[in-house]
Image (spheres, rainbow, N blue to C red):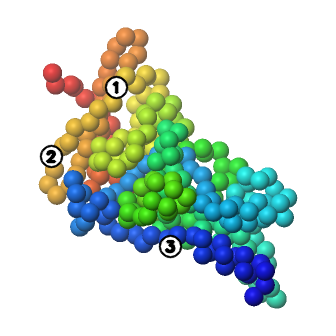
Amino acid sequence: MTTRDQANQEITNQQPAQPQPQDCACGGNGSCNCNTPSYVYAIGQYRPFFSSLGLKNEFTAAASALNVKPDDYYAVFSYTVNAPGNSPLTVKPYAYLAEQACWVLSINDIDTYLMVPQSEISLGSLVAGLNSSNSAATFVVTGKMGPAVAASFCGDLKLSLVITDNIQPLSNSSIALMIRPNDGIEEPSRAINFIASNIDTIAQQLELNSLRLQSLSYQFSPTKNRKLVEVIFGFEKAGVESFYCCGVDVTDQNPFLSYPLRAYVPVN
C-alpha cells in the first residue's frame, strides 16, 4: 500500500458512518410517530464542512493542485478527467471529498441542519449549487428528518439531520424576501416556506409586488384525509389594507397549492 493509499485509508477511518434514512427520528414523541415521516421543507444557505484535519488537508492539497481558490469547493468536487486507457468515460478524482463532507444548512444565518444526500443525484445537486456562476444564494431543501446520531458526528456540530432529496434555487421575488424563512418542520412552517419559494407563480396575476406585506398568518382548513393549511396575507398600500389567502396541501413531502390566491375577508 502506498503512502497516499494509507493516508486516504486513514481519512476514511476518521469519518463517522453515514446514517441511514429513517421514517422518524423523534422516537414517537409529541406530534411525530414512527409510522409517519417527519418532512422538512426549509429555505436557507448551505456550505460543506470537513470534520477532520485529514479531509481539510486533502481538500487544500487538491485546490492547490488545481490552482483554484482555497474555498472553491465546486471546482474541486466537480473536477473531471478522462478515465485511464482508451475508455470514453470520465472520472471525478476528488468526488470522495464531497461524499465525506458534512453539509451544513443555515437558516437566517443560524446553522440549523446537517444535510445527508439521499442519493448521488442529491449530492450532485448540492455540488452544483456551489458553482460561483449560480446567481442563487438561497435554496429550498426538501427531505425527511434523519435518525439521531452520536454527539461527535460531523465534528461536534450537534445539528439535526435532514435526509435531503432535493435542492432548488430560490427566486428573489420582493415578496419572497419579506417572508422570513423558518425551520420548515411543522405543517404551517412548511406551508409558509412553500409560499415563499413559489410566490412568483402564486401571485403573478394579482400584481402584488407593488404592495407591502403587513402580516402573515395561517389556519388549518378541515379536509378529509388531507392536511391543508390556509395561509393569509395582509397587504398595505397608501394606508389601505387588503387580504388574500391560498391553500397549501402539506400531507406529503412535497407541498402543493390546493387552491389559488384569492381575496380574503377577515372574520372578527
Q: Residue at x 25, y 66 (%)?
A: 34
Q: Nearer the viewer, residue 30 or 124?
A: 30
Q: Which residue is mark 1?
A: 215
| Position of residue 186 measured from the top left corner of the image (x, y, whole percent) | 30, 48
| Label 1, residues with CA under 10 Å away: few <14, some 14-19, many ≥20 | few
Cβ atoms at labels 2 and 3 below 8 Å apart: no
Give residue 120's quadrant in the image.
bottom right
Q: Residue at x 60, y 60 (%)?
A: 51
Q: Which residue is mark 3?
A: 17
Comparing marks 2 and 3, which lies closer to the viewer? Answer: 3
Comparing marks 1 and 2, which lies closer to the viewer? Answer: 1
Q: Amino acid at mark 2?
A: Pro
Quadrant in which the C terminus is drawn: top left
Residue 13 marker: none
Q: Residue at x 29, y 43 (%)?
A: 188
- Label 1 to label 2: alpha-carbon separation: 23 Å
Q: Nearer the viewer, residue 213 or 95?
A: 95
Q: Amino acid at mark 3?
A: Ala
Q: Amino acid at mark 1?
A: Ser
Q: Left or right: where does residue 87 sit relative to residue 265?
A: right
Q: Relative to 1, is 39 above or below?
A: above
